Amino acid sequence: MACPFFRPVQRLDGGGWDPAPRLTLFDAWSGVCTAAYDWTPPEATQREVCNCGYARGSCGRFPAGEAADAVRFSLLRERLIYVLEKDHAPIEHGEIDPVTDPREPLASQARAFLESWRSLLPRTVS
């Protein structure tokens, strides 16, 4: 579950996690916190907070009063679905088109999810 204020920019390496956590975006991503203004958190914060979600109470930049504290994605019959969560419970969900959806950083997270997901697919040999 990524933080709803995290805008992923590029993949991070494996990070030495053993075992690696199950991340909403499949891969760990570096990026920008958009909570107040664009800010690039230290890599350790990005790995442990931004990529993992539920940052309320563990991140000093997490805005007070914001409803969602995590985002997850799923593919359902070739449709990309998002779920916004608060305290581990869904509060909003729907389909998202990561190319045309204007909601940032949600659309950037959806694109990162798809990019990571596609990298897991077996390569077709021609």
Image (cartoon, helix red, strand yellow):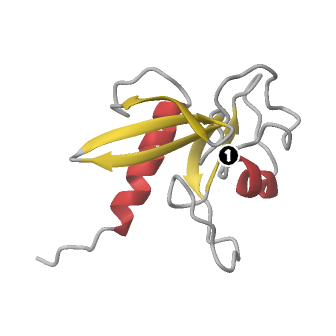
Residue at 62% x, 68% y: name it: 13
Near-viewer residue (84 or 14):
84
Q: Of the residues shown, which amino acid type is indicated by label 1?
A: Gly
Name the residue tied to disc 1. Answer: 53
Q: Quadrant of the C terminus?
A: bottom left
For numbered disc 1, what is the local secondary structure? loop
The image quadrant that residue 44 belongs to is bottom right
Give the percent coordinates (x, y) of residue 55.
Answer: 76, 42
Local packing at callout 1 (Cα closer than 10 Å; few below 14, some 14-19, many 20+) is many
Rendered view: 22 above or below 58: below
Q: Image check: 72 left or right of 122?
A: right
Residue at 40% x, 53% y: name it: 115
Give the percent coordinates (x, y) of residue 108.
Answer: 49, 37
Number of numbered discs visible in the structure rendering: 1
Near-viewer residue (83 or 15):
83
Give the percent coordinates (x, y) of residue 117.
Answer: 38, 58
Residue at 50% x, 60% y: name it: 26
Give the percent coordinates (x, y) of residue 125.
Answer: 16, 78
Residue at 69% x, 29% y: name it: 34
Q: Image check: 99 left or right of 8?
A: left
Q: Image check: 110 left or right of 14?
A: left
